[in-house]
Amino acid sequence: MISIREWRANSSLDRLDCDLLLKHLLNCSRSVIAASPEKLLVEADIAQLENWKKRRIAGEPIAYILGKKEFWGLNFFVDDNVLVPRPETELLVELAERCIRDGQSILELGTGCGAVAIALVQELASKGKNVSLTATDVSPEALKICKRNLENHNIKIRLFESNWFSNISGSFDMIISNPPYIENGNPHLLALGSEPAVALVSGDDGLDAIREIIKYSSTHIKNDGYLILEHGCEQGTKVQRLFKRAGFSNVSTEKDLGGRDRVTLGKMDH
């Protein structure tokens, strides 16, 4: 047996990853781990930690190893069929909540694990806004994860499979999406090899999905409705241009907490 302190010192992982693995293994808080560095780990615990360590060193996201990720203060089940929710995507929730009104309808394209949809419904309910939300994804496996998260958070929305607008009928007061927006061959993809490429990569300039969403959204957004899209930090100007060409007004790009262009929104005037 070895102590928590000894395993940490020899793990080759950073402190946060060590603590998250230990917290998950021992089902306790980080403060308990910090206060118990001499606690001995039994052989089964060490074997489990070593297995997780190998996966982490190989580049697997800590969220996949733990099977969960926090977003908007909520926990979500995740696996390698869905993108790991990022803090910067919370800006989508903020902007959608700001622009939507009670009784309106929202369509989310490419919901993944359902983090944005679930966080948004909960946030709107806390502000006294009840909306009709429809979420779609092209991946049946992602939809299974989303359904599990909906059940866990006791959220009811319409959920079905669709490749962007391929199975969409009707119109909505708001369409939101965090689509793939990384260009083919981007060196950052090397560090994202465990995550589904379909949720990350979108053509030679990273804008193929965004172009398609903007092009077809005009027929599915009600008058005075909003389109809100996440994109790469260097794509704001190009995305704004696409919005304006498609007839959107009041187009603006909002920055994430890191001060980087992250989400562009516009209003549809039919």
Image (tube, rainbow, N blue to C red):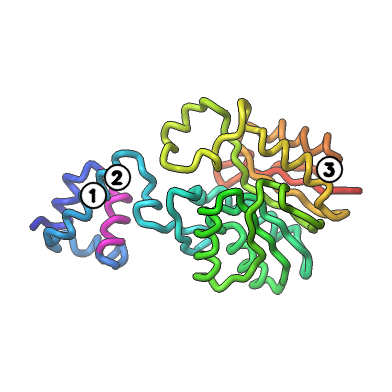
Q: Is residue 53 above or below residue 187?
A: below
Q: Residue at x 78, y 52 (%)?
A: 226
Q: Quadrant of residue 96?
A: bottom right
Q: Is residue 68 left or right of residue 13?
A: right
In terms of sequence position, does the residue under pointer 3 or pointer 2 come before the other? Answer: 2
Magenta region: which residues? 13-25
Which sits in the foreground, 36 or 171? 171
Q: How far apart are the two marked residues, 1 and 3, measured between alpha carbons?
A: 51 Å
Q: Which residue is mark 1?
A: 51
Is residue 185 among the parts visible in the rendering? yes
How many numbered marks have been drawn onto this rendered protein structure?
3
Q: Which residue is mark 3?
A: 248
Q: Is residue 216 above or below residue 102?
A: above
Q: Which residue is mark 2?
A: 55
Q: Is residue 177 left or right of residue 1?
A: right
Q: How far apart are the two marked residues, 1 and 2, measured between alpha carbons?
A: 7 Å
Q: Residue at x 52, y 59 (%)?
A: 144
Q: Residue furthest left?
A: 1
Say which element carries label 2. helix
